[in-house]
Image (cartoon, rainbow, N blue to C red):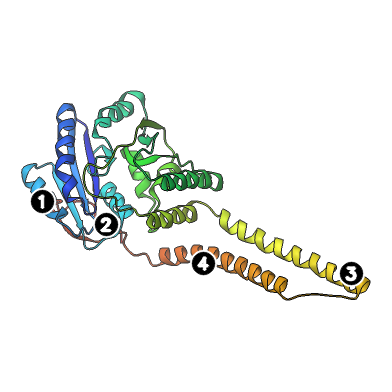
Amino acid sequence: MDMITIAVPCYNEEPALEPFFEELTSIAQQMDYVEFEFLFINDGSKDGTLNKIKSLAERDQRVKYISFSRNFGKEAGIYAGLQNALGDYVVIMDADLQDPPSLLPEMYRAIKEEGYDCVGSRRVTRKGEPRIRSFFARMFYKLINKMSDTDIVDGARDFQMMSRPAVDAILSMGEVNRFSKGIFGWIGFRKKWLEYENVERVAGETKWSFWKLFLYAIEGIVAFSTTPLVISSVFGLFCCMLAFVMILVIIVRTLVFGDPTSGWPSLVCIILLLSGIQMLCIGIVGQYMAKTYLETKKRPIYIIGESNLPKNSPAPRI
């Protein structure tokens, strides 16, 4: 009998865990033709998330958990879930019920009967989200797909089921600076998308502020595209050409009219413009250098504080 591991990264999800687990186990009961493993990853939560997970583990022996020594971020939680999953198929999903467990039977059927390696999910609506946030989200997907060769689908969720070869391919990418949406697309394999309308959180509040999403977008662009470096080079070339043209204009103006320059405001504006372009280009290069610097340190993606996993479970990357 096949085993499906449900890997659930959690950060301050105490109020959502009970309704989530009830619905998840209800779907698992319907899918009595497979075995389940429920793997919760506590990402350094500051509320009672860990205690709630422990109580679930006491009630159901299928529940396993990993608790990080501190908050390492959702990307580390996803990696830990994939690395420690024992199932033939692995599902990544959130605990807030925005990833409907009701899609699990269809996901499994698509892999087993239709021959897909991965089955992802994407929202076709963003009902309930602030309009400004939805607008920038759509712009991000359009931008990164133009800048990168990796196909990153608009509205794609981390919620997906993967076969063991796909999971192993993701684990082979041991980079510290991770952008899972890009990694899921980069590995390839046959993938099917299931569409559904946006679902509100069952409890709690989102942990993703606009600023965090903005930084996450920069992370994705830097991780899967070198186009910003090309843009900074084009800026530099354009400024050099513009400066050369202006030098010719000044020389001609001096020879013809005897007036090389007039007024300082225009000069100040030009200096500020060029300085701004220089700082922008330096910042772009700095982002790539910073990511390279962090990768060379070879620090572990996460550190386990405590867990109920068997001692022979896979160890975290060091």
In the displayed image of the protein, which residue is found farthest to the top?
113
Q: Nearer the viewer, mark 4 or mark 3?
A: 3
Q: Is residue 198 left or right of residue 132?
A: left
Name the secondary structure under disc 1.
Answer: helix
Mark 2 → mark 4, Cα distance in angstroms: 29 Å
Q: Nearer the viewer, mark 1 or mark 2?
A: 1
- Determine crowd level at label 4: few under 14, some 14-19, many 20+ residues with C-alpha closer than 10 A: few
Q: Which residue is mark 1?
A: 54
Total numbered badges shown on the rendered structure: 4
Name the secondary structure under disc 4.
Answer: helix
- Amino acid on which disc 3 is placed: Val
Q: Is residue 115 left or right of residue 77?
A: right
Q: Is residue 74 above or below residue 253?
A: above
First reached walking from the N terminus: tag 1 or tag 2: 1
Q: Nearer the viewer, residue 61 or 71?
A: 71
First reached walking from the N terminus: tag 4 or tag 1: 1
- Amino acid on which disc 1 is placed: Lys
Q: Which residue is mark 4?
A: 286
Name the secondary structure under disc 2.
Answer: loop
- Determine crowd level at label 2: few under 14, some 14-19, many 20+ residues with C-alpha closer than 10 A: some
Q: Which residue is mark 3?
A: 252
- Amino acid on which disc 4 is placed: Gly
Mark 1 → mark 3, Cα distance in angstroms: 80 Å
Mark 1 → mark 2, Cα distance in angstroms: 21 Å
